[in-house]
Amino acid sequence: MEQPEIGSRPGSFVLRPVMIFLFVSSLFGTVPPSLWAIDIQETHWGFDGRVQPARFNLLSVLVSNPGGEPVETELALIKSTPGGTPVDAPLIEPVFLAPFSTRWVQFTPFVTNDFESWSIRSGRDTFSIPNPRTQTRQNILLDSGTFSSTSRSVLRAFPENLFPPSVTATDALQLVVLDRMPRWEEARRQAFIDWLSLGGMVVVLHQPDGSFPRFSAELSPLNTPLTVARVGGGHVYRLAKGRGELTREELQHLIPSLDLEAASQKEDAAINNNYEDTNATESLGWQKYFSSLKQMSNPDHNWVLLHVLFWAYIAAIFPGVYLCSQKWTDYRIVYLILIGVVVVFSGLFVVVGRRGYGESTSVETVAIIRPLSNGAADVAGWSNAFVTSGGNYQLEHQGSGALYSSCQSTERVNGLIRNGTGGSYLVDIPPFSSREFAYRIRSKGPLPELKVSQLSADAESLRQFSATLTGLKKTPEQAYAVYRNKVYSLRVANQSLELGMALGSTNGFFKLDQFNSWSNSRYYSRHYSQPAAQGAAQKEQEYQQLWLPLLLRSQDISQTKDVKAYTLSPDLVRVFLYSDLPEEFLATTPLGAQSGRALYVLNVPLSGP
């Protein structure tokens, strides 16, 4: 698609010539049938048929061309309300199909909840697809066959050729069981290791000949001789069993933290239309980020002048126009006066109420950044773009595997989203307004580095922690360490981190109830009282309030039971640093001043208590 210039006429997307041809031709019925003749044969949500709410999730679609001519078109994934009203912006994926061929096409939409309806549009044709069922995390058996592959395993099979080529699309995946070396290209091998290092779990089983498979290239860390080995923040388990011999009890015994029973219960609850877990998960996180980020750039309207204009307008209509009608009996004069009053005050309201004073185009962002190998990072960000000049804006970030979403479930967005390689978000933003969006990307930029000099722990507590911190331009505003289910403050001074006070258990530190109360009180104060700070001070105050919801999001905590069940593996310490967001992780679109904060999540290996 040819990209429009920044600040072009609002609502006017520049289309490819072929799309204009297809649109005009379709109006007169002259579109060659082969251009539209595609079928949707299969659709599969997530890795095991389900999705994780409030996350980017996979949607795999098997597309076929039953005709004798090649087909080149674009598929659009449309989100709708239960009533059928389109919301959000459509996701676009290009497709080329040779005659009588099929291929898999993958979308990565942001699924808010399981009340949303989805469809795929190709030209004039629309295909409805089943709504996804929700599940917190997903466990799969990697298979060389298809989704319908039959095996005696306790887990659902997932075709290895559909594993995503970027870690950004693996958010919902918790466990992978495999008994062979997957036939993957470099991108998928790297995506798998990235997912593992972020906290994934892999179980390696025997091959049919009774031996463990050998892995090469990026997958070589899976060749560990240990029964349990750590890779970054994730773990590799080896079990001398074949896939047909694996039982739920053995898998649960091997990984005690894997709650297979709870997953089964959640599936049953979803079948019975029990959406309690879904709503609880959805209610926390990105709505809070958008609310705070939008508050940073809201126009500072002159509310006193607006109120004066309002009452003056009422007075001009009545008794003003009424008194004029008493003086001039010609109704045409009275109507002209009435129209004049409406036009004048409408213009005044547009000038005074449309904008504030002294605003400038800006973007505010918060992000969770988790280091990967080779200096790369997994970046999950939430931004609010405020513009003073309306137009179509191409939002992009530096990196690979880019995913975008407006996260809207109630409003239709005039825009187009292309995820994956060269991903971008083309969106219309009216003047003196803002547009919120979420993104996820594998990128490179300055990352904090810890050179640990002292680190020790016993079975319950962290005893010593001392490290040199480099890589950040500014001193972190917040610094904490978590070991097992205990939280500790970290003292930051002269590029060093030292163990500070023990702050108690995660159950007391991750205060979901207080967080929700804080959100409600902030909503009240924003709408019914004067803000506590203005300008730069207010922006700083908003950023300071967001580190806790970011921390909760980074640990997949959205409900009280998540907090109670939270505990880390005894072979690592997790460090959280809240600091400025480097410009390398900001949007590359020229959108004026950009600012942000990042929560860095670092896994520090511990040999064991």
Image: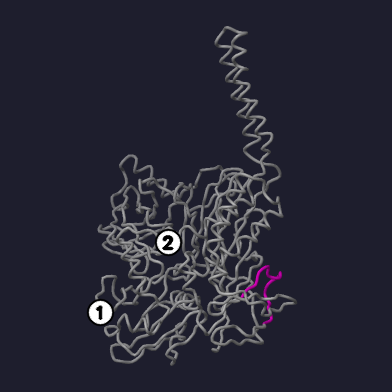
What is the magenta range? Answer: 467-480
Q: Is residue 8 above or below residue 479?
A: above
In-front residue for pair 360/307 = 307
* 513 is within the stretch colored magenta: no
Q: Quadrant of residue 47?
A: bottom left
Determine whether the residue tagged by mark 2 lies in a helix, strand or loop.
Answer: loop
Q: Is residue 277 above or below residue 486?
A: above
Determine whether the residue tagged by mark 1 lies in a helix, strand or loop.
Answer: loop
| Residue where numbered disc 2 is placed | 53
Say which residue appears at 71% left-offset and 75% top-offset: 492
Q: Residue 152 — which label?
A: 1
Q: How far across and down, in percent of the image, does residue 576 sit? A: 60, 73
In-front residue for pair 163/72 = 163
Q: Quadrant of residue 306?
A: top right
Q: Quadrant of the C terminus?
A: bottom right
Say which residue appears at 34% left-offset and 43% top-offset: 26
Crowding around mark 1 (Cα neighbors within 10 Å: few <14, some 14 to 19, many 20+) is: few
